[in-house]
Image (cartoon, helix red, strand yellow):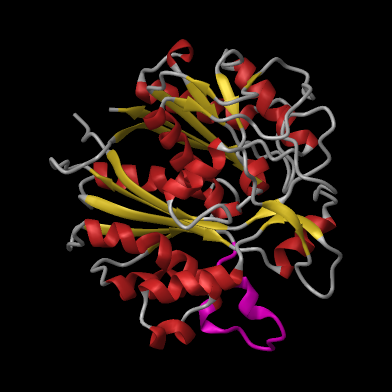
Amino acid sequence: MMKEIYITDYNCVTPLGFDVESNWKALLEGKSGVALHQVSDNHEAFFVSKINSEKLEIEFKRFFDSAQNDNFTRLEKMFLLSLKPLVERHRITEETAFILSTTKGNISLLKNKTTLPEGVYLSNLAQKLADFFGFKTKSIVVSNACVSGVMAIAVAKNMIQTGKYKDAFVVAGDEISEFVISGFNSFQAIGSEPCKPYDKNRNGINLGEATAALYITSELNQNEKFKFKVLGDSAINDANHISGPSRTGDGLFASIQNAMKETKVSADQIDFISAHGTATIYNDEMEAIAFNRMELQNVPLNSMKGYYGHCLGASGLLESIISMESALHNTLIPSKNFEEMGVSQDLNIIKKNQPAEIKYILKTASGFGGCNAAIVLEKA
């Protein structure tokens, strides 16, 4: 019999706040981090969800020695702030894994450089964070486009179940950079207004930045304030296109199907779906098709992109945390900016804050290169 795996703690740093409590309060009030920002001198202003750098510096100095301020990049400071409360509450042993999820890491270090700085390598970034907190095992990097955050949870679950580790700290993050803005702009994928996932009038994504961290374990103690069982997971590549999803949702459909088979949870038992919902035409349509193929079209569903933007490697982990908060508070958060159905298949898009008993959560993600992932969580 496989070990039961639980998420028992988490934290996040976003434009809406530097802890989970402030984020949840902002979401209940319908606040969004998406606003018009001048990301660089070389680009026009874009709607993005960006952390205030001055507030970030103030928060970092509250918790870390001022002498350390110059030793870390802006993104690394975000990571450290996410991890610090968890590390203080849980013991690190020789059987504790450290897993980093990111798509671009310290890509901003490349600006105006002729040689590659060591900090650009994702393995070096992960080990720097792990060494700071005194992790005893070699750090692990999960970097698979925009499914990275969801996959990092799955990697932690599976590695603990094999007996390689007893517990794990998983941290995910990406920041707004000129490189990322240029890439998505070249696809003509960036929206000219706050994004509207699944809406008839959507016209593209808003990029975002955040870090999020969680603690996952096979060994519970009496001090846990909550616990969520990670029941099942799956990641499938649809092999359709370097930047476009399968039009029939094959990869996402198979990912959800496999995850639910592992959990032995049926479609009518799922209480809530935290979907990817980028507000691009093909992604939203593909998701709608996949959910209908799984007979999940009546399950309450939202996308958090209207609040946080698309945070790349952080999205899946951050949105999983918000999903668990929804379950703890028995409250469904609306899919912000949604007004009129803009996909060909029926979906039960949440339009306002509403009470709900949430036991089983389905979290999905999709990304460039045809990757798709799904996990099923149970409020225990």
- Name the residue at the left extreme: 222
Q: Is residue 144 left or right of residue 224?
A: right
Q: Is residue 106 visible?
A: no
Q: Quadrant of the C terminus?
A: top left
**Is residue 371 magenta-colored?**
no
Image quadrant where residue 291 sits: top right
Q: Does the magenta stretch mainly form a helix, a strand or a loop?
A: loop
The reply to whether residue 1 is visible in this rendering is yes
Along the line of sight, which residue is nearer the eye, 219 or 319?
319
Does residue 33 sit above or below 108 in this rendering? above
Q: Residue at x 47, y 79 (%)?
A: 72
Magenta span has 110?
yes
- State the residue in front, 238 or 114: 114
Q: Position of residue 155 (x, y in %)?
A: 38, 47
The image shows residue 367 at horizontal and vertical percentages of 64, 45
Tell me: residue 228, above or below residue 113. Answer: above
Residue 277: image location, x then y, percent: 66, 36
| Image: magenta residue range | 104-119
The residue shown at (73%, 69%) is 178
